[in-house]
Image: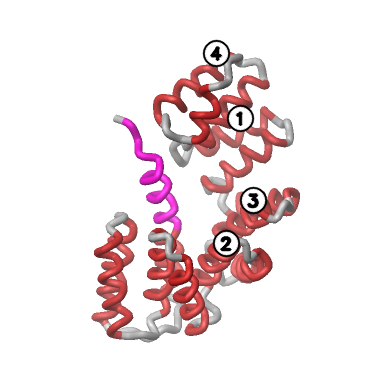
């Protein structure tokens, strides 16, 4: 059965978001009643299931009952990102941060959002605050986002440092491992790229990118049979991906 790439990526990103939201909500100073909590929990649950209309309905109910519910604003902002409504997303992130300036989950999510929309300085500032705070028990999330932001800014060495710091804190964090696979490949360290991929596959499934770089690394190492296997797997599993389209035209596998 052909995998739906967008659903797979959304599910992965949603998992990271829900983890962050749940981890930080207990530290939030936001006051909410039981009704708010129920709607918030339902909203986040539906969000994790990619049932966006139901998620939106419950999150808006949580805000209707308590407009100062930081985590409802945080979750709703992420939902608006998925609905490709960046203006609404930014508004709710700003509100969440105004309500609870020390919320590490909001700083991480808003910082990532700003970087993804070209506001690098502001985004990196928030990610630096989230990643350096000793009270943050998931610093690797913010460090990985900071690394990706650094790559977008063209700061490759700084980005690599962030990814390595993330892996020092959580050596099985899949997003940081996949980023290091790419960096190692671009640095010409194909054995390291192979090693990062093996670590990644111990905790997560292939993506089009991991397969693309795996095939290229094996080809560079002279392992043509394995390179062809990765190419075939990419074409079979993610035929509509950009990576599949690129590799289809490569003849020397």
Which of the two discs, 2 and 4, sits closer to the camera? Answer: 2
Question: Disc 4 on helix, strand or loop?
Answer: helix
Category of crowding for the residue at label 1, using alpha-carbon neighbours closer than 10 angstroms: few (below 14), some (14–19), many (at least 20): many
Whole-number angstrom distance, CA of label 2 to CA of label 1: 32 Å
Precedes in sequence: disc 3 or disc 1: 3
Which quarter of the picture shows residue 119?
Answer: bottom right
Q: Which mark is residue 194?
A: 1
Q: Position of residue 76 (x, y in %)?
A: 38, 70
Which of the two discs, 4 and 3, sits closer to the camera? Answer: 4
In the image: residue 64, left or right of residue 160: left
Q: Residue at x 36, y 46 (%)?
A: 7
Q: Position of residue 12 (x, y in %)?
A: 42, 49
Please give the residue where the numbered disc 3 appears in the rendered image: 163
Category of crowding for the residue at label 4, using alpha-carbon neighbours closer than 10 angstroms: few (below 14), some (14–19), many (at least 20): few
Q: Which mark is residue 225?
A: 4
In the image: residue 53, left or right of residue 23: left
Whole-number angstrom distance, CA of label 2 to CA of label 4: 40 Å
Whole-number angstrom distance, CA of label 4 to CA of label 1: 15 Å
Above or below for 91 versus 247: below
Which quarter of the picture shows residue 247?
Answer: top right
């Amino acid at each position: 059965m052909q995998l739906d790439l967008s659903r797979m990526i959304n599910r992965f990103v949603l998992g990271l978001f829900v983890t962050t939201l749940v981890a930080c909500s207990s530290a939030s100073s936001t006051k909410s009643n039981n009704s708010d909590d129920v709607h918030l929990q339902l909203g986040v649950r539906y969000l994790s299931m990619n049932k966006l209309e139901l998620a939106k309905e419950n999150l808006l109910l949580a805000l209707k009952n308590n407009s100062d519910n930081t985590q409802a604003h945080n979750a709703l902002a992420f939902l608006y990102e998925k609905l490709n409504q960046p203006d609404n997303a930014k508004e709710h992130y700003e509100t969440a941060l105004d309500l609870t300036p020390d919320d590490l989950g909001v700083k991480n999510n808003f910082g990532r959002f700003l970087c993804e929309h070209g506001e690098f300085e502001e985004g990196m500032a928030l990610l630096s605050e989230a990643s350096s705070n000793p009270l943050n028990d998931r610093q690797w999330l913010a460090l990985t986002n900071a690394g990706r932001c650094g790559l977008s800014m063209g700061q490759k060495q700084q980005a690599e440092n962030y990814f390595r710091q993330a892996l020092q804190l959580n050596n099985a964090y899949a997003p940081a491992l996949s980023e290091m696979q790419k960096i190692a490949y671009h640095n010409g360290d194909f054995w390291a790229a192979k090693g990062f991929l093996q670590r990644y596959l111990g905790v997560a499934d292939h993506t089009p990118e991991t397969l693309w770089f795996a095939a290229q690394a094996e080809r560079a190492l002279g392992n043509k049979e394995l390179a062809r296997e990765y190419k075939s797997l990419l074409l079979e599993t993610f035929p509509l991906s950009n990576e599949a389209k690129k590799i289809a035209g490569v003849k020397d596998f």
